[in-house]
Image (spheres, helix red, strand yellow):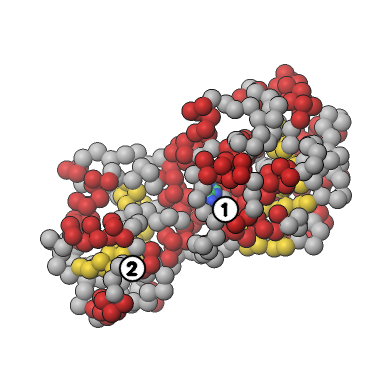
Amino acid sequence: MTTDTNLTFNDFNFEETLLEGLYSMGYKQPTPIQQQAMPVILNNKDIVACAQTGTGKTAAFLLPIIQHILKAETRHLNTLIITPTRELALQIDQQIDGLGYFCSVGSIAIYGGSDGMAWENQKQSMENGVDIVVATPGRLKALLQNGSINFEHLQHLVLDEADRMLDMGFFDDIKQIIGYLPKKRQTILFSATMPPKMRLLANQILHEPESINIAISKPAAGIVQQAYVLYDAQKEPILKEILKNEDFASIIIFSSTKENVKRLEKSLIRTEKSIKAFHSDLEQTEREEIMRDFKARRLRILIGTDILSRGIDVDGINLIVNFDAPPDPEDYIHRIGRTARASKAGVAITFINERDMPKFGQIEALMGIEVAKLPLPESMGPVPKYDPEAKRKFEGGNKNFKKGGFKKPFNKSNDRKRS
Ligand code: AMP
């Protein structure tokens, strides 16, 4: 499924303070899973959503839940999010901090391995008022059994990465935990896969759920995917090297904006005669002529934005260059899908600068493969280190805290680091 490019976060009637939070985290447009899941959750319906990490699934359930909390007449411990690992619990807790930064929503992460002191602090902060608990099953079950935690006002239950929890043997724990929760609640289940045991669990604990499936398409098997990790200034020199290979008889180069496309055409045309830019400023007749020439192999290289990536059905394109990394995984699949059509082989090369590392990391995660990173010729100088994870954390919600110090939302305990 592709993103509806017209839909914005302003279309969901979120509170201003919540919008401020998500925009400050750099979210510009809802991802496909957000577009599909948020209206259902806002509508108080149960939901089973099949979506992988990297699709924006966490915000897909957090944003509507925070909206519900902000609209609630009285504030209680309102939401329980059960998640397989402490790392994930902490990540979700951090995302709540980021998204709820301007609307004081209080959350707490509870997981195994916390020492007694930390639990005392957490308990204290819960008594002072926490809206959302994010917990791992083992620890949570223990707290419920000894009566340390009470969910009588619970309105939302989220099972995140439910298939992983089942794989880790938490099936019975989850069922026991649910026995402590009010029957009247909204239940939200997110899972990357839907094995039969998951269906069984879903049937037992959800009430007339809506199902959503964000299936990420896989690229065709005949495509050789490669990447260069580099600085912007190195992109053109390596591109010129690649284009010298005459085996590549039919090539599309993707760039992020129309302006970049035009600039690149100007620069490459000095050495490459058979090259044309394809963009929305051209007349329809010019576009058609370019496309005819490209199809007939009178034109070797086409440079364009993502408008080129969908629907062009030209046989025999044997090289795709992503001069700029594509905005999201679906676009990547569409772009590289222009090559290796009809079982022919093709090569797709992506240039990854430091800014695009997190995006590309997500693309790799979603495809479940690691794209080969080719070394740049030494003569082109040193390159940045490929580190999608570190950069993603830096670009995510944490930045608020690093810059301005930790904001203490809604009586939140500050002991998260020790717990
Ligand atoms: P997730 O799939 O929940 O693990 O999210 C993957 C990453 O995407 C996280 O770093 C989120 O902060 C980020 N993210 C979620 N929604 C959006 C969005 N609409 N725009 C940009 N980034 C997003």
Q: Position of residue 3 (x, y in %)?
A: 52, 62
For the C terminus, the quadrant is top right
Q: Determine which of the numbered discs, if any, sits on residue 9 in the image.
A: 1
Left or right of residue 35, residue 126 in this image: right
Residue type for callout 2 = Ser
Q: In this view, does 211 lie above or below 381?
A: below
Q: Can residue 337 be seen in this view?
A: no
Residue at the image position 44 percent from the left and 45 percent from the top: 358
Q: Position of residue 64 (x, y in %)?
A: 67, 50
Left or right of residue 103, residue 204 in this image: right
Residue type for callout 1 = Phe
Is disc 2 placed on a helix, strand or loop? loop
Foreground residue among 107 and 43: 43
Q: Position of residue 215 (x, y in %)?
A: 57, 63
Q: Mark 2 points at which residue?
A: 280
Q: Report which quarter residue 353 is drawn in.
A: top left
Is the distance from the Cβ of mark 1 to the nearest ligand 1 atom less than 8 Å? Answer: yes
Determine the residue located farthest toward the top in the rendered image: 117
